[in-house]
Each structure stands twice: as structure tokens, then as C-alpha cells.
Image (cartoon, rainbow, N blue to C red):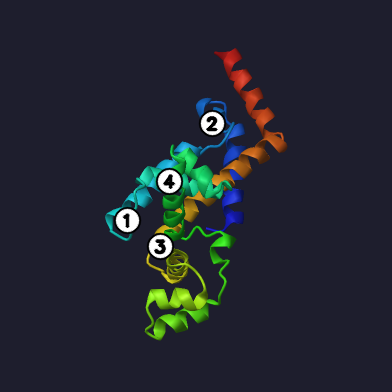
């Protein structure tokens, strides 16, 4: 569903709620995000569990930790900060590899001292990884990381799952935008007024 259409529907919902006096609780939920970080985390974790159960990749991270990774990445945190949020800064490399596997790329991931086509040609030539790392002038570990990034960028296996995760995150972002819009447009004041009237009646 296009974002503009979702926005209109949410706005219509908010306006509809402010016109009703029978229900107080739904109005209260408009203050702040309707879908908070924990709720979004649970949804993303369920999708991550599906991915892991299908055996698409292996990681030390649990589905809930992967969900935290996704949300924290979306909030602009780096791998070390995400690892700290998971409770162990030493998980930074694990976070980085899992992040790349689910196509949460950073610009630095593609900052390679060679052209991608050059690596592909070398691999197709039948040369060993040690020979290729020597030719490219990089360490074997760096070569493995670059190969991982390129392979994941080209792999479409997880795309249907990642699209679902993207939808969950976009819904959360849209809801937060609409919550701010409620305040900015004066609808929050209308909600407060209606709630006050209900309290007086009761």
C-alpha cells in the first residue's frame, strides 16, 4: 500500500477517534507511538525466526537479537553500538556479518580497493583465494569479508522476508510521523478535551 494512502487512512482514523466520546482508552494510545519499539521488535523477531528455521544462514544471534539489530541499524547505530545494546561489545563482528546477510549495508561495506568485476574475473579464472588476495594486495580475511558482501548483495533468497521486515519498519515510522502530526495539527488537544469531558461525565 503506498505510503500516502496509509497516511490518509491513519489521519482519518485519528480524526474519527477524536469525534467519539464512548471510548477513552484508544484515544490515550494516540499519545506516543501506536506501535512501540518492543511491539515492532516482536514482529521482526517472528520473521527472523522463520529465516533461521529455514536454515538460510547461521548466527550466534537469536531472533530477538536480530530484531534488535534491525531496529538499531534503522535508528542509525553502528555495529559496535548495536553489539553494546545486545550486551556484549565483542559481538560487533557477529553483528556485522549478520547485518550483511540480511542486506543492511553501509557505504563502507562497498569501499573496496578493487572493482567488483575484477574479483569476479579472478574467481572465474580458477585461482585460489590465497592467490587472489595476493594479486589484489589484501589479506585473506579482508577478501572473505568482501566476497561475503558481494555475495549477499547479489543473493535474492531472503528478499521476500526482508520486504516484510521493511513493511513493519515503514509502518512504525509512518505511525510515529502521524503521531507527531496529531500534535502539530492540534488533534491531540481535541483528544485531551474529549477525555476531560468524559471524566467529568463519569
Q: Residue at x 57, y 26 (%)?
A: 21
Q: Earlier in the sequence, mark 4 or mark 2?
A: 2
Q: Residues within 10 Å of mark 3 (few under 14, many from 20)?
A: few
Please tell me in which quadrant of the rendered image residue 176 appears: top right
Disc 4: which residue: 91
- The label number, if any, that marks residue 170 in the structure image: none
Closer-to-camera residue (18/47): 47
Please tell me in which quadrant of the rendered image residue 2 appears: bottom right
Disc 3: which residue: 160
Please indicate whether residue 131 sits to the left or right of residue 12 in the image: left
Q: Earlier in the sequence, mark 1 or mark 3?
A: 1
Please indicate whether residue 159 sits to the left or right of residue 202 in the image: left
Identify the secondary structure beneath mark 1: loop
Q: Position of residue 199 (x, y in %)?
A: 58, 15
Disc 2: which residue: 29
Q: Earlier in the sequence, mark 1 or mark 2?
A: 2
Q: Nearer the viewer, mark 1 or mark 3?
A: 1
Identify the secondary structure beneath mark 3: helix
Q: Earlier in the sequence, mark 3 or mark 4?
A: 4
Q: Residue at x 46, y 54 (%)?
A: 96
* Discs 3, 4 touching: Cβ within 8 Å: no
- The label number, if any, that marks residue 58 in the structure image: 1
Identify the secondary structure beneath mark 4: helix
Mark-to-mark CA distance, 4 and 1: 15 Å
Q: Nearer the viewer, mark 3 or mark 4?
A: 4
Q: Residues within 10 Å of mark 1 (few under 14, many from 20)?
A: few
Mark-to-mark CA distance, 1 and 2: 38 Å
Q: Is residue 3 visible?
A: yes
Query: Can you say which quadrant of the picture contains the C terminus?
Result: top right
Q: Earlier in the sequence, mark 2 or mark 3?
A: 2
Residue that extends furthest to the bottom in the rendered view of this protein: 125
Q: Residue at x 47, y 67 (%)?
A: 139
Amino acid at each position: 500500500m503506498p505510503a500516502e494512502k496509509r497516511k490518509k487512512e491513519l489521519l482519518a482514523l485519528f480524526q474519527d477517534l477524536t469525534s467519539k466520546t464512548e471510548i477513552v482508552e484508544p484515544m490515550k494510545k494516540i499519545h506516543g507511538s501506536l506501535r512501540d519499539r518492543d511491539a515492532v521488535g516482536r514482529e521482526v523477531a517472528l520473521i527472523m525466526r522463520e529465516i533461521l528455521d529455514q536454515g538460510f544462514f547461521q548466527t550466534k544471534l537469536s531472533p530477538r537479537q536480530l530484531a534488535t539489530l534491525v531496529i538499531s541499524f534503522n535508528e542509525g547505530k553502528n555495529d559496535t553500538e548495536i553489539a553494546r545494546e545486545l550486551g556484549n561489545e565483542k559481538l560487533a563482528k557477529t553483528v556485522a556479518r549478520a547485518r550483511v546477510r540480511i542486506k543492511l549495508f553501509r557505504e563502507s561495506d562497498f569501499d573496496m580497493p578493487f572493482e567488483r568485476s575484477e574479483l569476479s574475473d579472478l574467481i572465474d579464472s580458477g585461482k585460489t583465494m590465497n592467490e587472489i588476495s595476493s594479486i589484489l594486495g589484501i589479506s585473506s580475511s579482508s577478501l572473505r569479508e568482501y566476497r561475503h558482501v558481494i555475495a549477499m548483495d547479489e543473493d535474492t533468497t531472503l528478499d521476500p522476508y526482508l520486504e516484510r521486515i521493511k513493511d513493519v519498519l515503514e509502518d512504525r515510522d509512518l505511525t510515529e510521523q502521524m503521531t507527531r502530526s496529531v500534535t502539530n495539527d492540534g488533534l491531540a488537544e481535541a483528544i485531551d478535551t474529549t477525555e476531560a469531558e468524559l471524566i467529568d461525565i463519569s
